[in-house]
Image (tube, grey):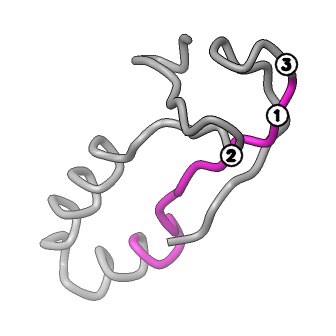
């Protein structure tokens, strides 16, 4: 899975640090859904809903639900 990096303020570290989050490749999943006549839509939804929030690279703390700390 591709990753997304962003500079954010960490509630545990108390400073702006690099945060990394894994994101599904939506183009690939769209193509798989089209080629499998919609069957791949279920795994795509499960992967998108089950992804973990961004994680601080300094202390390892993850964001809470809905991107809140």
Is residue 12 found left or right of 38 in the rendered image? right
Q: Is residue 42 above or below residue 19?
A: below
Tell me residue 25's x, y (percent).
52, 69
Residue sitting at 49 percent across and 72 percent down?
1
Is residue 11 placed above or below 42 in the rendered structure?
above
Circle nearer the N terminus (2, 3): 3
x then y, percent, for residue 22: 53, 56
Image mark for residue 17: 1
Q: Are marks 3 and 1 in contact (CB under 8 Å)?
A: yes
Q: Quadrant of the C terminus?
A: top right
Q: Residue at x 46, y 17 (%)?
A: 66
Q: Is residue 63 magenta?
A: no
Magenta region, residue range:
16-29
Q: Relative to 1, does residue 48 appear above or below in the rendering?
A: above
Check disc 2 and report the residue beneath it.
57
Query: Are circles 2 and 1 on residues that touch, CB within 8 Å?
Result: yes
Q: Secondary structure at mark 2?
A: loop
Q: What is the distance, in whole Å, between disc 2 and disc 3 at their CAs?
A: 12 Å
Q: Which residue is labeled 3 in the image?
A: 15
């Amino acid at each position: 899975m591709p990753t997304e990096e962003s500079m954010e303020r960490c509630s545990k570290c108390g400073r702006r640090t690099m945060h990394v989050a894994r994101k599904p490749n939506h183009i690939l999943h769209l193509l798989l859904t089209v080629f499998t006549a919609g069957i791949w839509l279920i795994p795509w939804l499960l992967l998108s809903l089950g992804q973990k929030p961004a994680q601080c690279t300094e202390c390892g703390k993850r964001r809470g639900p809905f991107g809140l700390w």
